[in-house]
Amino acid sequence: MQQVLTALKDIPGVVGSFVLNDKGVLVSREMPAIYPDNIYPEMGRRLIGVYEAIALQMASLGDFLLKFDGHWFLCRRTTQCFLGILTTESVNYPALKMATNVALKQLDAQVSSMTPILAEKAVEPASVEEMAVVPEPEAAATAAPSKGKRFWRGSWID
Amino acid sequence: MLAHKGFEGVIQGATLADLIQMECLALTTRAVRVDGGASTSGRLFFTGGQVVHAEVGEVKGELALFEMLRWPTGSFTIEEGVRPIDETIERDWHNLLLEAAHHADEIAHSATLSPVVPLPAPKTPADVMNETFNDPEILQAARFTEDGTLLAGKGADPESLQCTFAYIIQLLRHVGTSLGAENLKEINLIAPEQKALCLVSEESTTVLITTAKANFTTIAKKLA
């Protein structure tokens, strides 16, 4: 799976990418080291919230592209996973789209057998009402396991 | 009040082709209104040193440019900050001027003149917004402010559209913050049969639910 994400960097402008499973839990990432693993649980919850909210308004959402100052974020979804790609705004979007088509095809088969990187309690898709209060980004830090715990063979130990 | 920078004066004997060369070499982005006398006028649009659009009445694109280049005399006025609604010219300006000369030769040879129609008033942002909302490819639309005021809508339930997008914008701003990306400007949502374009600015947010065929690049340019 790591190879699939690494291959996305062949497209100039791709900063990094990650895969969340259908519960929003991180299963693989190829992101620069400045992004700690504890950002992904909150991100997964929010991405699921976006998909749920959009489902109330229009037919099932497949992909979305966010354009920020200097950066774009593309999120593509399959039945098994979410693929998130952070790029600069100069990225060749058609080339990126095709690269992610190929990546998704390969990822879908692999995701179900992957062990989550952060073996946290799975994030259940929350209802829109429950999602209405959005925690501050700092709250992401609290979702990470406490210091002194180590991840060993699929579970956290003291 | 700040004075305009640069020189001012009158140049006689210069041609419109000279002006185009000057604007393109200076890599300007602005419009130039060209008056050819006898109620004939047109407008040229430059973006980054290329001619991207020209209009003379209802005539647009290269034909409009060629028309203006054939006017024997005239004057021009620089219009700063005026942007084109369409981009009808793609050819590099060097080729464009060569083609214009060729075109002028052909016209002179056939001695036929195209009709000149008075220049319509430039479209206001409100006109562009109404035009966009009335586009048959736009199925639903809503425009609202950050404080929750619904400014305009299209479709059965613009309030619901506003609620949904006001919420997801908040979520996606947090996603961006986690990734170190600031100032969410645009969201493109792709579903099998529909798409959604959300343009976020300080003044207002515009959400358009469109058919799958709609071209977001064109729509976003129009509304920018």
Image (cartoon, coloured by chain):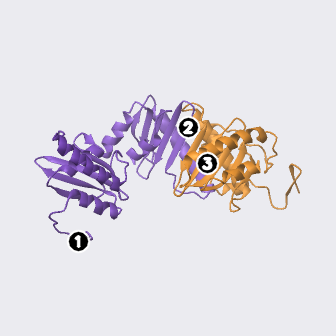
Q: How many marks?
A: 3
Q: Which chain, by letter, is purple?
A: B
Query: Residue visible at 19% across and 62% down?
Result: B14
> Chain A drawn in what color?
orange
The amino acid at mark 3 is: Val
Could you say whether the residue bearing mark 2 is in a helix, strand or loop? Answer: strand
Chain name for mark 2: B
**Of the numbered discs in the image, which one, if any, rests on residue B7?**
1
SS at circle 1: loop
Residue B190, label in figure: 2
Q: Nearer the viewer, residue A46 or B181?
A: B181
Amino acid type at circle 1 is: Phe
For disc 3, the neighbor class at 10 Å (few under 14, some 14 to 19, many from 20) is: some
Give the residue drawn at x 69%, y 54%: A39
**Residue positioned most to the left:** B38
Q: Earlier in the sequence, mark 1 or mark 2?
A: 1
Label 3 sits on residue: A134
